Amino acid sequence: MPEPASQEHPFARDVRSLIAGRLDKSRMVEICSTPTALSVAGLKALPLFVRPSVLEKVIIHKHGLSPESVGRLPDELRNPVAIFKSDTRPHDSVVVVVDLWLENHPVVVAIAIGQAVARTTANVVTSVYSKQHHAAFEKWLKDGLLLWSDKKRMPAWLQSIGVQFPKEETTQAENTV
Protein backbone atom coordinates (compact mmCIF):
# COMPACT_ATOMS: atom_id res chain seq x y z
CA MET A 1 0.00 0.00 0.00
CA PRO A 2 2.84 2.43 -0.65
CA GLU A 3 1.73 6.02 -1.09
CA PRO A 4 3.42 8.21 -3.69
CA ALA A 5 6.47 10.13 -2.51
CA SER A 6 6.49 13.89 -2.67
CA GLN A 7 9.16 15.98 -4.41
CA GLU A 8 9.77 18.59 -1.70
CA HIS A 9 7.79 18.32 1.49
CA PRO A 10 7.24 21.39 3.70
CA PHE A 11 8.58 19.34 6.62
CA ALA A 12 11.98 19.07 4.90
CA ARG A 13 12.03 22.88 4.63
CA ASP A 14 11.19 23.13 8.34
CA VAL A 15 14.11 20.82 9.16
CA ARG A 16 16.46 23.03 7.12
CA SER A 17 15.05 26.12 8.86
CA LEU A 18 15.74 24.52 12.23
CA ILE A 19 19.36 23.84 11.29
CA ALA A 20 19.74 27.43 10.01
CA GLY A 21 18.26 28.81 13.24
CA ARG A 22 15.18 30.25 11.53
CA LEU A 23 12.46 27.92 12.88
CA ASP A 24 10.02 29.21 15.49
CA LYS A 25 10.77 26.80 18.34
CA SER A 26 7.59 27.72 20.21
CA ARG A 27 5.34 25.89 17.74
CA MET A 28 4.93 22.24 16.92
CA VAL A 29 6.13 21.24 13.45
CA GLU A 30 3.68 19.34 11.26
CA ILE A 31 5.27 16.33 9.59
CA CYS A 32 2.24 15.18 7.58
CA SER A 33 -1.22 13.72 8.05
CA THR A 34 -1.22 10.29 9.65
CA PRO A 35 -0.28 7.98 6.75
CA THR A 36 -2.53 5.15 5.58
CA ALA A 37 -0.30 2.38 6.97
CA LEU A 38 -0.53 3.90 10.45
CA SER A 39 -4.31 4.23 10.08
CA VAL A 40 -4.52 0.56 9.07
CA ALA A 41 -2.55 -0.23 12.24
CA GLY A 42 -5.24 1.54 14.27
CA LEU A 43 -4.14 5.16 14.58
CA LYS A 44 -6.75 7.82 13.96
CA ALA A 45 -6.31 10.02 10.90
CA LEU A 46 -4.91 13.05 12.72
CA PRO A 47 -2.13 15.49 11.97
CA LEU A 48 1.32 14.16 12.84
CA PHE A 49 3.51 16.66 14.71
CA VAL A 50 6.95 16.84 16.31
CA ARG A 51 8.40 19.33 18.79
CA PRO A 52 11.42 21.36 17.58
CA SER A 53 13.30 20.19 20.69
CA VAL A 54 12.86 16.58 19.53
CA LEU A 55 14.24 17.49 16.09
CA GLU A 56 17.24 19.13 17.74
CA LYS A 57 17.84 16.03 19.86
CA VAL A 58 17.54 13.75 16.83
CA ILE A 59 19.80 15.79 14.53
CA ILE A 60 22.14 17.89 16.68
CA HIS A 61 22.45 16.74 20.27
CA LYS A 62 22.02 13.01 20.69
CA HIS A 63 20.96 10.66 17.90
CA GLY A 64 23.07 11.89 14.98
CA LEU A 65 20.61 11.50 12.12
CA SER A 66 21.28 13.75 9.15
CA PRO A 67 18.89 16.62 8.39
CA GLU A 68 18.30 15.01 4.97
CA SER A 69 17.23 11.70 6.54
CA VAL A 70 14.95 13.44 9.03
CA GLY A 71 13.49 15.58 6.24
CA ARG A 72 12.43 12.37 4.47
CA LEU A 73 10.24 11.26 7.41
CA PRO A 74 6.91 12.04 5.69
CA ASP A 75 7.80 9.69 2.83
CA GLU A 76 9.35 7.08 5.13
CA LEU A 77 6.26 7.06 7.36
CA ARG A 78 4.06 6.59 4.28
CA ASN A 79 6.01 3.44 3.44
CA PRO A 80 7.12 1.86 6.74
CA VAL A 81 8.65 -1.56 7.11
CA ALA A 82 6.66 -2.37 10.25
CA ILE A 83 4.58 -0.87 13.03
CA PHE A 84 4.73 -2.19 16.60
CA LYS A 85 2.90 -1.35 19.79
CA SER A 86 5.32 0.24 22.20
CA ASP A 87 6.61 -2.30 24.71
CA THR A 88 6.72 0.39 27.43
CA ARG A 89 3.53 2.33 26.52
CA PRO A 90 1.37 -0.15 24.56
CA HIS A 91 -1.91 1.72 25.15
CA ASP A 92 -0.87 5.08 23.78
CA SER A 93 2.28 4.72 21.67
CA VAL A 94 3.62 2.92 18.62
CA VAL A 95 7.08 2.36 17.19
CA VAL A 96 7.40 2.62 13.42
CA VAL A 97 10.32 0.95 11.65
CA VAL A 98 11.28 3.03 8.62
CA ASP A 99 13.71 2.23 5.81
CA LEU A 100 16.50 4.42 7.19
CA TRP A 101 19.75 3.18 8.71
CA LEU A 102 22.37 4.80 10.92
CA GLU A 103 25.70 2.99 11.29
CA ASN A 104 24.13 -0.37 10.30
CA HIS A 105 21.26 0.00 12.76
CA PRO A 106 17.61 0.44 11.74
CA VAL A 107 15.90 3.72 12.53
CA VAL A 108 12.63 3.73 14.45
CA VAL A 109 10.10 6.50 15.02
CA ALA A 110 8.26 6.60 18.36
CA ILE A 111 4.78 8.11 18.12
CA ALA A 112 2.44 9.08 20.97
CA ILE A 113 -1.17 8.56 19.91
CA GLY A 114 -3.97 11.11 20.26
CA GLN A 115 -2.13 13.82 22.19
CA ALA A 116 -3.49 17.28 22.97
CA VAL A 117 -1.65 19.82 20.83
CA ALA A 118 -2.75 23.44 21.20
CA ARG A 119 -6.48 23.31 20.48
CA THR A 120 -6.54 20.01 18.64
CA THR A 121 -5.65 16.35 18.97
CA ALA A 122 -2.70 14.90 17.05
CA ASN A 123 -0.29 12.01 16.86
CA VAL A 124 3.11 13.24 18.04
CA VAL A 125 6.58 11.93 17.18
CA THR A 126 8.42 11.71 20.49
CA SER A 127 11.74 10.39 19.15
CA VAL A 128 13.60 9.14 16.09
CA TYR A 129 16.67 7.01 16.72
CA SER A 130 18.66 4.01 15.59
CA LYS A 131 17.72 0.84 17.42
CA GLN A 132 21.07 -0.71 18.28
CA HIS A 133 19.72 -3.73 20.15
CA HIS A 134 18.28 -5.82 17.32
CA ALA A 135 17.09 -8.48 19.77
CA ALA A 136 14.36 -6.02 20.76
CA PHE A 137 12.63 -6.62 17.42
CA GLU A 138 12.65 -10.37 18.03
CA LYS A 139 11.17 -9.81 21.50
CA TRP A 140 8.50 -7.48 20.13
CA LEU A 141 7.50 -10.10 17.57
CA LYS A 142 7.40 -12.89 20.17
CA ASP A 143 5.39 -10.65 22.52
CA GLY A 144 2.75 -10.07 19.81
CA LEU A 145 3.40 -6.33 19.50
CA LEU A 146 3.42 -6.30 15.68
CA LEU A 147 0.46 -4.27 14.40
CA TRP A 148 1.33 -4.10 10.72
CA SER A 149 4.17 -5.00 8.37
CA ASP A 150 5.04 -4.68 4.71
CA LYS A 151 4.70 -8.34 3.74
CA LYS A 152 7.19 -8.01 0.89
CA ARG A 153 9.95 -6.15 2.75
CA MET A 154 9.63 -7.46 6.31
CA PRO A 155 11.22 -10.93 5.84
CA ALA A 156 14.32 -9.50 4.14
CA TRP A 157 14.50 -6.68 6.68
CA LEU A 158 14.38 -9.16 9.59
CA GLN A 159 17.09 -11.24 7.95
CA SER A 160 19.25 -8.11 7.49
CA ILE A 161 19.26 -7.55 11.26
CA GLY A 162 19.81 -11.21 12.04
CA VAL A 163 16.27 -12.18 13.06
CA GLN A 164 14.61 -15.09 11.27
CA PHE A 165 11.02 -16.11 11.80
CA PRO A 166 8.58 -18.33 9.97
CA LYS A 167 6.73 -16.44 7.25
CA GLU A 168 3.45 -16.32 9.21
CA GLU A 169 5.18 -14.34 11.98
CA THR A 170 5.90 -11.43 9.65
CA THR A 171 2.50 -10.87 8.09
CA GLN A 172 0.00 -8.19 9.03
CA ALA A 173 -1.18 -8.63 12.60
CA GLU A 174 -4.81 -8.50 13.68
CA ASN A 175 -4.12 -6.22 16.67
CA THR A 176 -4.99 -2.55 16.58
CA VAL A 177 -4.15 0.31 18.89
Image: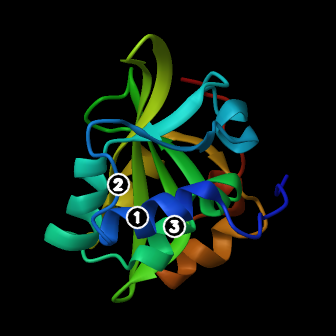
- Image location (x, y in percent) of residue 104: 38, 88
| Residue named by callout 3 | 71
Answer whether residue 130 is visible to the viewer in this image.
Answer: no
Q: What residue is shown at x 32% (from left), y 42% (from top)? A: 51
Q: What residue is shown at x 38% (from left), y 79% (from top)? A: 66
Comparing labels 2 and 3, the label whose residue is closer to the camera: 2
Q: Secondary structure at mark 2?
A: loop
Around disc 1, counting alpha carbons within 10 Å, would you say few (fewer than 14), some (14 to 19), or many (20 or more)? Answer: few
Kind of residue at badge 3: Gly
Answer whether residue 49 is visible to the viewer in this image.
Answer: yes
| Residue named by callout 2 | 23
Kind of residue at badge 1: Ser
The answer to whether marks 2 and 3 mark residues whose Cβ atoms lie closer than 8 Å is no
Kind of residue at badge 2: Leu
- Find the distance from the CA under tag 2 to the CA under tag 1: 5 Å
Q: What residue is shown at x 48% (from left), y 16% (from top)? A: 121
* Disc on the earlier residue, 3 or 1: 1
* Disc on the earlier residue, 2 or 3: 2
Q: Residue furthest left?
A: 61
